[in-house]
Amino acid sequence: MKKNTLSYKCQQYAMFAGVSTLAFVAVVILPFVYGLYLTFTSWDGVSKNKPFVGLSNYADTFSDTAFWQALGRTVIYSAIAVVLVNVVAFALAYLVTRGVKGQNFFRAGFFIPNLIGGIVLGYVWKFVFNRAFVALGNAFSIGALSTSWLATTSGAMLCLIIVSVWQYAGYMMLIYVAGFMSVPKDLIEAAQIDGCTPNQTMFHVTVPLMTSSFVQCLFLTITRCFMVYDVNLSLTKGEPFNTSVMAAMHVYNQAFTYKKYGVGQAEALILFLVCAVVGVTQVYIGKKAEVAA
Amino acid sequence: MKKLVALALAALMALSLAACGGGGGGGETADGSADNGGGSVNITIFNSKSEIQSQFEEMAAEYSAATGVGVEVYFSSDTVAAHMATRYASNDPYTLAMVDAKDVYSLGAEHAIDLSGENWVPNTQYAVSVGDQVMGFPVCVEARGLMYNADAIEAITGEPFNPADYATLDAFKGLLDTLVAGGMEAPVGIMKEDWSLAGHFLAEVYEEQDDVFAFVDGLYAGTESLADNAKFNALMDYFDVMKQYNYAASSPIAAEREISEQYLAEGKIAFMFGGNWDWSMINAYDYSENLGMMPVPQNLDDGANQKLVGGGSKFFFIDSSEYTSDEQRQAAKDFLNWLVFDPAGNKFLTEDCALVPAFSNIAAENLDPLGASVKEYADAGNLIDNYNYLPDDHYSLMGAELQKYLAGQQDRAALAAAIEAYWASVTPVER
């Protein structure tokens, strides 16, 4: 049998990747193309007619200041949250790979927040911020805690960041733990014999060998933070004064609540492009920095 | 062994794929479909009032058993319009959908059938018509106003509380001062939710104008000046008083609805702006007996301080698409007639769900205290109509502006300017 004919290759491809290609096209590519088409219509989400309006949705998007504010807010939120999540996760991973007693228990414990859905988590933390902290603040006369943080503009953002860090740090910790474990022991011993201090071992041997963990974690946190919706919805719902509306929530509101499906879809596309550019750039740079042992 | 595992995995995958394709009902709860004989009709009902979902499910089972029509009731916590959009997008509409008036206007022309010929039409003044066709069946009457806890007030004043005595803002403020002097430190609560502030309270500024349609047209055209509007100022004067006596005055945006309702139910506060739907939350707490609703107090003698604002609320429409058969449509019509003309249907509406009936032939004895107040005002003709043509983003964007005002971050002039700017920029809603 000839193995370099086109039909043979097609057959092989269909056999091994056919089903997944089909599924991928059906649930990712087709909706994406259809969504792209909807950005050129003034559909309201329910009507049978989808009037073609050309590029006017994009014009609306560019003049929609609330969207750009939400996007700017999302960038700030993501920048802070991504850094904090990874710092905390790395620190946790470091601690639970030192061989402390019961470290498996700690690993499981730190990971658990990630198993709770974002919606539930938001409600739980809303209770903590609105009642528990306020009760503590009043009981011990701590001024900063005596009113709910969720009621102020910057406080609501802070709450969102805290909850995100709490939620994702455990997950990222697992990836960093795997990274730590993958660093060959002999290299570390070699470094120590050569006279490296623990800090030098960490930053010149362990961390460079863990670059792939960093790339993965950063990619995951960046995309998740940019697309944050569930915690945003249940924790702040955009309040106060719609100043904690993130980009994804704004898109949802445009499309479904305000019934401007076309505009919402166009804004979603822009959000996608921003995410894609940031994510791909980050992975590209990260991959270049990777070293092999 | 390996083969077996592979086989099991393959089976598992096939199963999960099938579940994805076949299920499709993610996010909703369905119940109440009774086992009925082959060949009979099944209808689906969308319920958008969360507080009566369990009653609906029980009713569906009983109704199916009695009539042989399979009834499935669905509920979704999504925005009604958003949920309908997803159902229509997936070509899987409900036979009978309970939506808000504005949804009947926006969906009716394309998706609803004409119900003008139905027997219940002459018995109600709250049905929604699109063009000259009756399309929305009113589920109940709901009204907005000031909720009060008479027991809490009487415990301090020592005399029977008669809401009519406090129709003017001056009298009302006097009462609040008495309550404060009597030991109730902060006698009122304010819901900070955007739908309450803008959808319900701010809407009264429009609805209580002499001619709401002309007024809104003026807002669209940018010719109305709210700062000079007597109604706007009267209602904002009332709002200022509420702000002053708010139990959460130090951090009004942190006030949670659950807590405020609990305070009102238990008499920790005496007044809160709301509507008879708030009963579904109040009755979760240890409420005192004598609750009720009264008009919003204001120093204007246009009669609005004698009336609640409201009317028909939640409307059923029957789907007109090809995905619903004529038999199903007939079954849905029968169901609506059952609600209005059958004693069991009446009992379901007024007793099981404690809704204020929208039909003149239905008597309602066992209403909750807030519903009883609403019925009293409705029967006396003292309801100011809802304005059902607010733009979709009004409650959210204007809610944010009122929240700023509530939190003391902008003054009345800035609020008026923000509202005027919003109306001037928004695309007018057809009506």
Image: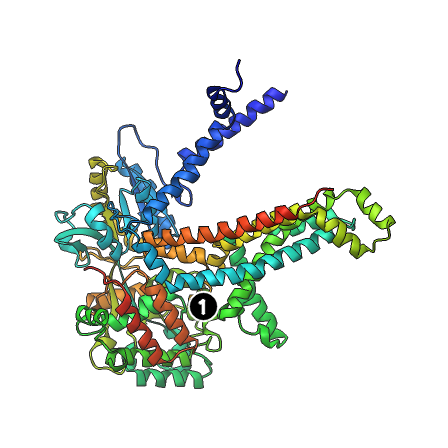
Q: Residue at x 32, y 62 (%)?
A: B393
Residue B107's spot in the image, x, y percent?
Answer: 24, 50
- Looking at the figure, which quarter contains the C terminus of chain B? bottom left
The quarter of the displayed image where residue A184 is located: top right
Residue B130's spot in the image, x, y percent?
Answer: 17, 54
Establish if B419 lies above or below A84: below
Q: Residue at x 56, y 74 (%)?
A: A146
Residue A138's spot in the image, x, y percent?
Answer: 59, 75
Left-right relation of B30 to A73:
left
| Residue that sits furthest to the top in the current view | A1
The residue wearing badge 1 is A240
Q: Nearer the viewer, residue B262 or A286?
A: A286
The quarter of the displayed image where residue B263 is located: bottom left
Circle 1 sits in a helix, a strand or a loop, which is it? loop
Q: Residue at x 48, y 63 (%)?
A: A73
Q: Residues within 10 Å of mark 1 (few under 14, many from 20)?
A: many
Q: Nearer the viewer, residue B55 or A11?
A: A11
Q: Nearer the viewer, residue A199 or B341?
A: A199
In this rendering, the count of numbered labels is 1
Check disc 1 and give the amino acid type. Pro
Residue B395's spot in the image, x, y percent?
Answer: 33, 64
Residue B152 visible in the shown view = yes
Establish if B200 lies above or below B13: below
Left-right relation of A95 to B26:
right
- Looking at the figure, which quarter contains the N terminus of chain B? top right
Left-right relation of A111 to B123:
right
Establish if A245 lies above or below B327: below
| Residue that sits furthest to the front in the current view | A4
Q: Nearer the viewer, residue A6 or B343?
A: A6
Residue B49 visible in the shown view = no
Q: Please, which chain is the residue tagged with disc 1 on?
A: A
Left-right relation of A199 to A126:
right
